[in-house]
């Protein structure tokens, strides 16, 4: 199996890259969606990015349409939405699948490396109350699940969708990795 940093990825503009392009940085990989109840998390993620980018943090957003078709747009529409609505400046990637049979190799690698999430919060319970059947670990629960990758390209933590960018557990984990 190839290292997670070697997996081929497409940026939202269609250009090819890998996570190796971010070597030496701490990465927060987030699957995002434009029409989700958690979409306002873009605001906190952008604030976190602006605060910690100079310290070596990169937030990498991967739009996905796996959960109730909450990311129906094209890559161009997604990029425009993120720019105009949340003034997102962190890197956006082309839309991928993060769950199911067509799961992108990046997400297969992420969940294999870190099968358990930190924090379940009320979100999972809310999904059940809405009559939905949330994915169980190791699968991605919903939009805005977060994976933390250290400077060596190793997945070191995973956070449930309702763990926001301001959550002390997430911030402490990021700060610990930036300090190494």
Image (tube, rainbow, N blue to C red):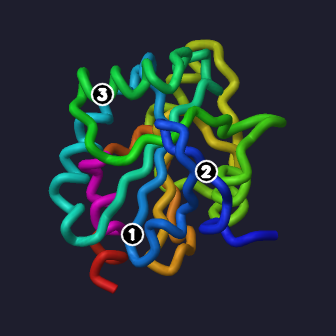
Q: Residue at x 48, y 37 (%)?
A: 12
Which residue is disc 3 drawn over?
40
Provide the secondary structure element on which disc 3 rests: loop
Which residue is disc 1 drawn over?
26
- For the question of whether residue 147 can be seen, the reply is yes
* 169 in magenta: yes
Which residue is disc 2 drawn over?
9
Q: Position of residue 71 (x, y in %)?
A: 53, 21
Q: Position of residue 149 (x, y in %)?
A: 49, 67
110, above or below 176, in the image? above
Q: Position of residue 179 (x, y in %)?
A: 28, 82
Q: Which residues are magenta?
A: 165-174
Q: Nearer the viewer, residue 26 or 121?
A: 26
Q: Nearer the viewer, residue 30 or 37?
A: 30
Q: Say which of marks 3 and 1 sits in front.
A: 1
Mark found first going from the N terminus, 2 or 3? 2
The quadrant of the picture occupied by the N terminus is bottom right
- For the question of whether residue 115 can be seen, the reply is no
Q: Position of residue 115 (x, y in %)?
A: 67, 58
Decide: few, some or many residues near mark 2? Use Cα within 10 Å; few <14, some 14-19, many ≥20: some
Mark identifier at residue 154: none
- Spatial CA span between label 2 and label 1: 18 Å
Q: Residue at x 65, y 18 (%)?
A: 132
Decide: few, some or many residues near mark 1? Use Cα within 10 Å; few <14, some 14-19, many ≥20: many
């Amino acid at each position: 199996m190839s290292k997670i940093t070697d997996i081929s990825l497409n940026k939202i503009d269609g250009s090819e890259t890998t996570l190796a392009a971010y070597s030496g940085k701490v990465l927060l990989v987030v699957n995002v969606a434009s029409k989700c109840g958690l979409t306002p998390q873009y605001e906190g993620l952008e604030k976190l990015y602006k605060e910690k980018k100079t310290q070596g943090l990169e937030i990498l957003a991967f739009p996905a349409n796996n959960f109730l078709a909450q990311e129906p747009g094209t890559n161009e529409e997604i990029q425009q939405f993120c720019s105009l609505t949340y003034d997102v400046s962190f890197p956006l990637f082309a839309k991928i699948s993060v769950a199911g049979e067509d799961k992108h190799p990046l997400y297969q690698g992420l969940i294999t490396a870190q099968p358990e999430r930190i924090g379940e919060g009320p979100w999972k319970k809310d999904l059940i109350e809405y009559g939905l059947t949330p994915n169980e670990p190791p699968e991605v629960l919903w939009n805005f699940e977060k994976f933390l990758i250290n400077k060596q390209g190793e997945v070191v933590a995973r956070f449930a969708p309702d763990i926001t960018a301001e959550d002390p557990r997430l911030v402490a984990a990021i700060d610990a990795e930036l300090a190494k």
